[in-house]
Image (cartoon, rainbow, N blue to C red):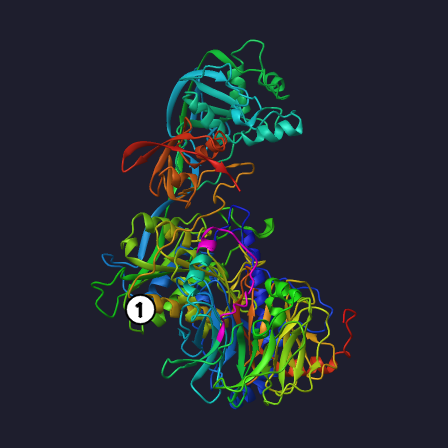
Amino acid sequence: MRILRSVSIAFVLVVQLASQSAYQERDFLTRVRRLTVEGRRAGEGYWSPDGRRLVFQSEREPGNPFYQIYVLDLMSGDTKRISPGIGKTTCAFFRPGTDEIEFASTHADPKSKQYQEDELAFRASGKERRYAWDYDPEMDIYAYSEKTGALKRLTEARGYDAEGSYSPDGQWIVFTSMRDAYNRQLSEKEKKQLDTDPSYFAEIYIMRADGSGQRRLTTVAGYDGGPFFTPDGKQIVWRRFDESGLIANVWMMNPDGSNQRQITDFGSMSWAPYMHPSGQYIIFASNKLGFENFELFIVDPEGKKEPVRVTYSDGFDGLPVPSPDGKTLAWTSSRSGGSAGQLFLAQWNHEKAVEALRNAPPKKPSNKS
Amino acid sequence: MTTTTDGTQRAQRAQGRLNSVFSAISAFLISPFLISAFSICAPSAAPQSKTKTYVQTLASERLEGRLAGSNGERLAAEFIAGELKRIGAQPLPGQRDYRLPFEFTAGTKDGGSRVMIGQETFSTETDVRALSFSDNGDVTGELVFAGYGIVVPGSQDFGYDSYATLDVKDKVVLVLRYFPEDAEQKTKAILARYADLRYKAMAARQRGAKAVLVVTGPRSPNAGETIPMSFDTALAGSGIVAASISGAVAKGIFDAIPGKTLQDAQQALDSANPHVAGFAIPNVTVTVHAMVQREKKTGNNVAAYLPSTTDVAGVAKPWIALGAHYDHLGHGEAGNTLAAKEDASKIHFGADDNASGSAAVLAAAATLATQPRHRNVLVAFWSGEELGLIGSGAFAAKPPIPLDAIAAYLNFDMVGRMQDNKLTIQATGTSPAWAKVIEQSNIAAGFDLLLQPDPYQPTDVATFNSSGVPSLTFFTGTHADYHKPSDTADKIDYEDLDRIVDFATAIAKRIGDLADAPQFTKVEQQTQPGAGRAGVRVFTGTIPDYSTEVKGLLLSGVIGGGPAEQAGLQKGDVIVEIAGQTIANIYDYTYALDVLKIGQPAKVVYIRNGQRRETTLTPAARK
């Protein structure tokens, strides 16, 4: 390679951040690899039960600036869109033991195409805005059949229904709904709240896999969202925001809504929890170290220990999902530059994670809570 | 044989002994472990690296750092050609050999320059030596002493013009080397910028002088000495006869003027007082015979192809190309070493730069040769990259296959030092097709990819980008051994280099199998490559071709969205005049940039297809 004459030579250096922990990222994550390249951003990768595929959302559909849902075959490298291609979608999940994949979508909204064009025009204008999820009230949950391509609508309620995931036996879906903001008379204060931050009304619900028996599990003000069953199906782990929408923590409860308990207490935004298949720890993301610097952490299910930091890279690291065998981690990161996240994979060192938590000090209570 | 080489060999013999002792001990210590490892959990033999032998051979002592035009380069080309034959690749259509020679200027020396003053002739190199950029020829004329021969462009708000009061038309100009010695620092800094010998020669030429003679003044460093030939791959003469003369010759000249000495004349000028003028030297006629021998050397690109296994009739763009430069720095002769002085003339093995990339292309070709192919696969090994992309430039200037028949070009430059699984892919902005192909291929390859859209990189990918070919270049990052003799084969990470080969092979296969060739996208560039002189403030968006001998500035491309593109200039145009300044070569052009004003339209005269044309270019501010 020729010596570059201008100053812009791209030195690729690995900057090792100073850290107080005895552990570094490479203790937990090795062979980090970037999985998605195409499109503006991608994320929320969830494993098929056999660990051979991932379902994820990506802004890569020509003519549609919003997320659509894709299935990626890790054996062949082939990617297939399974969502309708119109409107916004989010949060897909494989239904164990079947050919179904659930996700949330706004394609039934007749205004969907207009929104797409408006957003494309806005982007073409060169203006920028902070990335924000808009909790579209037309969002509903659907189940897609990979065999027939048929799409079955599971929720009908006005208000954002999304963030669904199946129980390990495939019989139940836990999800987030904001229907509470639309199915009753709101006070003046609540109306104002709905305008500025609809997620305030989000609560955790459960339903059967066919959409029947929808039931509310949480009732506390502030955004309850992102619920997942634990691998044994006996618990639900989710994140609960306070009323300000700035502080969030990892919580657990029984599938009937009983025994709700707080696991983390950073006094920052701790969210996207997912239980490791071993059941020994929860992986989650928090911006404890800086408002826009989300890192991954692990914590024991009882929340007795101080969480252990896993990632040490600039930018966003979040939405961690371990593979069914617990040996690989899929997560969303902006570590390769830019503000938009892409899907990453790495080998996960389970033994090191267990050891690090064993050595971790008892939980320090946050002074903010 | 030089003492340095002796030293190197001694060191290496010692190293060899050390190695054999060490390996004897370690083999003894670890052999039980190895046996158990192989018998329990590994296949009977460790898998053979696809690239190690290639790198070790190319980066061996015998190939002496593969400097373009050297014996080492010739041996390397021979080795590559042999491997291509073994793989079953064929010489390109219409070629009988894998080697595609190209000529370039590797250096300059004086070919017997002389100066005659009156009846006296000076002909030794201690008395007269042509400047490396001189035109060859004989010139006779009256003499004018033009001080330091410095002209500061009006745009600099600093009035200094050695020619302000002089008429030098059809005369021979005598100037001092360097710049006024006693000027205050700030003034010096300005004058120094315009004191380059090429710039002085251009200033004299533009005022109609026939020749310029340079003398190193008695009050300057190197007083009275002629100026050594500079290493210069550039190539065109500067459009004027130019030579340096000794203090003795200058004395001969000044002896003709009663009461004046060079010493006094220099002293008067050394305060940089702009009102101290030069003067004509009456009654002296000088004849300058300048002769520069430009040492032409021949470099060799090596290229072959794997014909498609299916009929390519009707296939859009029926070629894909993989390439890497195989030349390196030799013994650092070309001055582009980064080694400390005592190591600068040792062999620069260039294992990572770029035996690694060459090995990757060979290994990828070996794999592709065994697979069905729906496009012809061109595999190319460039020489002269380290001297300024000369080899790939020569290929693109006279392409043996049409460049617009190439669907995509994959370049490999420094791919042997992977860290933390990070692989950089540059030039991804050259096609919208890349994201999908890279994503699909990386599912199996599993790299932590860093993608950079910018194709204006200091490697051969720039050549193909300029030719409108969708391109990628692979890079594992720079390191402390970059451009030093310590870039050796033992430091290469062969396991990951082999993974890069698999990855690139998969990309090549996917592109080769596409029904539609990838679209080319022109990437806009923010900053101007090349020149990089401190203080150049204007941006014209031209990409000069450094590798040819055209009179004028040949453009190897224009930067997308830049002023040159907006002015309608394009690749292949030769700029001969800008803002009233004639341009004989790239140096003139660089100096002409100083005269340009941001936002003020300037007339550009250029040659396209042999026709002289004009346009207006509005320089932008350099970011």
Residue occupying the point 53% across, 29% down:
B194
Asked if residue B215 lies in the magenta stretch, the reply is no
Q: Is residue B84 left or right of residue A190?
A: left
* Residue segment shown in magenta: A121-140
Q: Nearer the viewer, residue A234 or B15?
A: A234
Rendered view: A266 above or below A358 = above
Residue B265 % position (x, y): 59, 17
Name the element at disc 1.
helix
Question: Image quadrant of residue A334?
Answer: bottom right
Magenta stretch: helix, strand or loop mostly: loop
Residue B169 % position (x, y): 41, 17
Residue occupying the point 34% across, 65% down:
B511
Asked if residue A132 lies in the magenta stretch, the reply is yes
Q: Is residue A357 left or right of residue B414?
A: right
Rendered view: A72 above or below B38 = above
Residue A227 % position (x, y): 59, 79
Q: Which residue is mark 1?
A: B513
Disc 1 chain ID: B
Residue B520 % position (x, y): 35, 55
Question: Image quadrant of residue B270?
Answer: top right
Q: Is residue A245 left or right of residue A324?
A: right
Residue type at mark 1 is Asp
Q: Nearer the viewer, residue B310 or A231?
A: A231
Image mark count: 1
Residue occupying the point 54% across, 52% down:
A9
Q: Could you classify mark 1 by the number of other residues whose Cα lies within 10 Å: few (under 14), some (14-19), or many (20 or more)?
A: some
Question: Image quadrant of residue A267?
Answer: bottom right
Q: Nearer the viewer, residue A111 or A327?
A: A111
